[in-house]
Amino acid sequence: MPDFCMIRLTLHKFLSAGISAMLEAVAFSGQMLDARYWMPDIQKCTWNASQKHPNFGELSRAVSRNQYPGSINNANGFRRNRLSPIQYFMQLPGRESSALLDDMNSDRKILLAEIRSSLKSLGIPSSLFEERKLPVFQDASELVVIQNNSSGCPYYLIPEAARAWEKLRNAAHCDGVTIEILSAYRSFQRQFEIVKSKIEKGMSPEVVFSVNAPPGCSEHHTGRAVDIGTPTCIPLDKSFDETTAFSWLQSNAGQFGFKLSYPPSNPCGFEYEPWHWCYQGSSS
């Protein structure tokens, strides 16, 4: 059994020094887990040391069960002084922090097992996923319909991201720019079906995973990611970065909490996707 008091003390030392991103791993439950999956962005309460890939999966269940008070709004509806997950854990008695960490670690183990099982069913070695050290995401537990597509099928986002998207779209409209959603929430099962379809068509796993995340590794699972298009551009095409809409997003999306996830030469190894933006929380 690890010494959680020592772990919390060590984390506090690093966080206080402002160098939490230098931690290579966090130890608990007898294992060493990659810090990119578990370290928090203190300002946004997301599991992400590098601030490149918001990993909301393991925390989402604790938040939905109200086990993480740092996620609760204050009386004014704002979260000005909310705790980060690590700060919250450091305030818990040893047994409580141990139980919550064990619970989250268990959820992550289950998800990793599901990812490996789904890849195995397609004849894909799990090493293709493991060697890239991709972040993993649970399916979002609370979703709202933001609009329907041309076929009448709904697009879903989590409530906070849905509100941010409406503000982003309206601001663009006021500036004479039209942006539209091409894809939003996508479940683990739907991601599996997309990958399965491409494999059955004869595409190699390496090619598939250069443009599609393995099931369990897509930001779309979080209900925060949107693929954005504009009427003057072919959907989901790299030429989107030549449009006025993309230029406007580059200048303004951050004000509404959205960030381009996969720029050229991104560390996840995906092809450049100028259309893929993910809500990371309000900067205000």
Image (tube, helix red, strand yellow):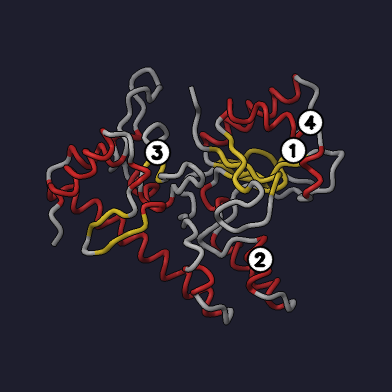
Residue kind at label 2, given as amino acid type: Ile
Front in this rendered view, residue 117 or 19: 19
At x 54%, y 80%, the residue is 121
* Sequence order check, earlier mark of 1 and 3: 3
Q: Which residue matches tag 2?
A: 194
Residue kind at label 4, given as amino acid type: Thr
Residue kind at label 3, given as amino acid type: Asp
Q: Which residue matches tag 1?
A: 180
* Sequence order check, earlier mark of 2 and 4: 4
Disc 2 to disc 4: CB gap under 8 Å = no
Disc 1 to disc 2: CB gap under 8 Å = no
Where on the picture, by quarter, is residue 197?
bottom right
- Residue 97: x, y in percent? 19, 48
Crowd around label 2: few <14 · some 14–19 · many ≥20 (10 Å): some
Mark 3 vs mark 2, foreground winner is: 3
Tell me how far mark 1 sits from mark 3, CA to CA: 29 Å
- Residue 67: x, y in percent? 28, 43
Is 145 placed left or right of 104 in the picture?
right
At x 81%, y 39%, the residue is 242
At x 18%, y 37%, the residue is 91
* Sequence order check, earlier mark of 4 and 3: 3
Q: Which residue matches tag 3?
A: 41
Q: Which residue matches tag 4?
A: 178
Say which element carries label 1. Answer: strand
Tell me how far mark 2 sits from mark 4, CA to CA: 28 Å
